[in-house]
């Protein structure tokens, strides 16, 4: 049997997703996620123009060899566009292999190492009071881990903060339609936000203090710094929140500077998580061998699929480092399912990020994973357990959408 067709489907049910459909000569269909937020069409072209023609006629069961072929043969290795494309192929081939076996994918990855995956959800509020209301809603639903993000006095819209209407689900979607300014030729620019690290550092310890005071010591509290601090600023924050026993501090420094975390480690025992913008095991080499992190933040979608992320987790496991896979809404339900199957199978699972997709997205992607009492499970459907409804997908055309740009008060460009 062999790969007969590869189709790239770009659909926008509320947000953009890039999905690869691989069809085998015996009619089995596999799905893969190649969504790269704000750069979707680059991955779609990479798959359509450069990958698909080289895979037709190949043995669909040769998953490892295909991964190595796509990684090594173009000469230009790694990078987010390439590795999202590799991920899409890899997931689709694993989906096919598991469908052929008639088993949920995790059984082909070594079987379940646990009964379910502890999830963490996103609570946010423009004020501490609103944040605490959001946390209370999740605690009532049985979640045991919550990421807390709060507005900073004096700053407007910032990463991760969105006030949900009372009783409504939290739906934070940072990518937005670019704005036109009426100029000719028409400019199309991402929205802009303003940032002040000193104001943030002054405020955040009081956020942790208030949430701890209200919810006690047991609830796991996480926070995402979104790559905005210098090493010494990050060290200051990690030390300041230490008394509130954070589960982790995520992306405290820019991801590409692996050595930056040495300084943070020297000053604090706050657990550190990083890696959502990484795309290969090499991005983790210093971080893992020097034990500078506690959790791996990659997702299957951005780190070369199940094969790529499994490499990272095997390496991390030798150093006792656990998973905390990225699970935002810009990882499609296909990528989310891949995260869940891998997380259920590996020994060194830690926690799984869970941001529910919108009802519109879930009409296009039919899922069989579940969340119950704060625990996720990929389900027992053969394969990944997610099917894309092509007719539903066709109703949602691609819409340009970009993540915001961040500037300091003096107008200089900062990390968003
Ligand atoms: O901003 O996935 O921890 N989660 C995050 C995400 C990222 C988006 C970027 O596309 O930091 O919300
Ligand atoms: Co993050």
Image (tube, rainbow, N blue to C red):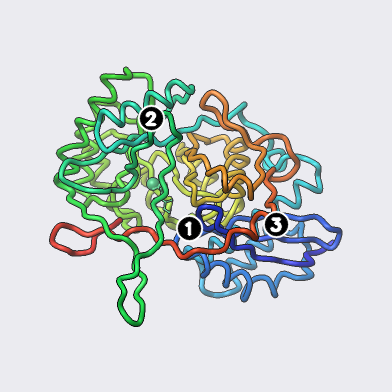
In primary-sequence order, the first of circles 2 and 3 is: 2
Q: Quadrant of the C terminus?
A: bottom left
Which residue corresponds to the image point at 38% horizontal and 34% vertical from the top-left? 165
Q: Is residue 285 left or right of residue 70?
A: left
Residues at circles 2 and 1 in contact by the CB criterion of under 8 Å: no
Q: Residue 380, labelled with which disc?
A: none
In space, the residues marked 2 and 3 are separated at their CA atoms by 34 Å
Where is residue 306 shown, x and y percent of the image? 60, 50
Which residue corresponds to the image point at 78% horizontal and 64% vertical from the top-left? 3
Where is residue 385 shown, x and y percent of the image? 69, 43
Where is residue 386 shown, x and y percent of the image? 67, 46
In space, the residues marked 1 and 3 are separated at their CA atoms by 32 Å
Q: At numbered mark 1, what does the secondary structure look like: helix, strand or loop? A: loop
Q: Residue 279, labelled with which disc?
A: 1
Q: At numbered mark 3, what does the secondary structure look like: helix, strand or loop? A: helix
For label 1, the crowd category at 10 Å Cα-Cα, with few meaning under 14, some 14 to 19 and many 20 or more, is: many
Q: Residue 166, labelled with which disc?
A: 2
């Amino acid at each position: 049997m062999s790969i007969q067709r590869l189709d790239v489907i770009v659909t926008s049910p509320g947000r953009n997703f890039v999905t690869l459909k691989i069809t085998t000569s015996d009619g089995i269909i596999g799905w893969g996620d190649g969504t790269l937020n704000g750069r979707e069409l680059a991955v779609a072209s990479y798959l359509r123009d450069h990958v698909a023609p080289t895979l037709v006629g190949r043995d669909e069961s040769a998953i490892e060899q295909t991964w190595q072929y796509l990684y090594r043969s173009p000469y230009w290795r790694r990078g987010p566009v390439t590795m999202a494309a590799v991920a899409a192929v890899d997931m689709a081939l694993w989906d096919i292999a598991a469908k052929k076996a008639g088993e949920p994918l995790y059984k082909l990855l070594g079987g379940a190492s646990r009964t379910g995956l502890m999830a963490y959800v996103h609570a946010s509020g423009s004020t501490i009071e609103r944040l605490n209301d959001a946390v209370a809603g999740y605690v009532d639903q049985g979640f045991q881990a919550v990421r807390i993000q709060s507005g900073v006095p004096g700053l407007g819209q910032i990463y991760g903060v969105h006030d949900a209407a009372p009783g409504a689900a939290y739906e934070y979607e940072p990518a937005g339609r670019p704005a036109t300014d009426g100029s000719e030729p028409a400019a199309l620019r991402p929205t802009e936000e303003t940032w002040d690290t000193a104001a943030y550092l002054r405020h955040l310890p009081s956020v942790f203090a208030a949430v701890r005071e209200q919810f006690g010591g047991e609830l796991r509290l996480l926070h995402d710094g979104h790559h905005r601090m210098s090493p010494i600023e990050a060290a200051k924050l990690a030390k300041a929140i230490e008394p509130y026993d954070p589960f982790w501090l995520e992306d405290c420094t820019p991801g590409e500077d692996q050595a930056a975390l040495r300084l943070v480690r020297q000053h604090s025992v706050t657990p550190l998580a990083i890696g959502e913008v990484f795309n290969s095991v090499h991005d983790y080499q210093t971080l893992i061998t020097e034990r500078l992190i506690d959790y791996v933040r990659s997702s299957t979608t951005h780190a070369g699929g199940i094969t790529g992320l499994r490499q990272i987790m095997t390496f991390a496991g030798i150093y006792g480092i656990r998973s905390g896979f990225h699970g935002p809404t810009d990882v499609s339900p296909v990528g989310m399912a891949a995260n869940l199957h891998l997380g259920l199978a590996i020994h060194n699972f830690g926690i799984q990020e869970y941001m529910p997709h919108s009802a519109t997205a879930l009409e296009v992607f039919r899922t069989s994973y579940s969340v119950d009492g704060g625990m996720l499970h990929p389900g027992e459907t053969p394969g990944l357990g997610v099917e894309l409804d092509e007719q539903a997908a066709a109703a949602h055309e691609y819409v340009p959408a970009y993540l915001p740009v961040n500037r300091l008060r003096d107008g200089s460009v900062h990390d968003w």
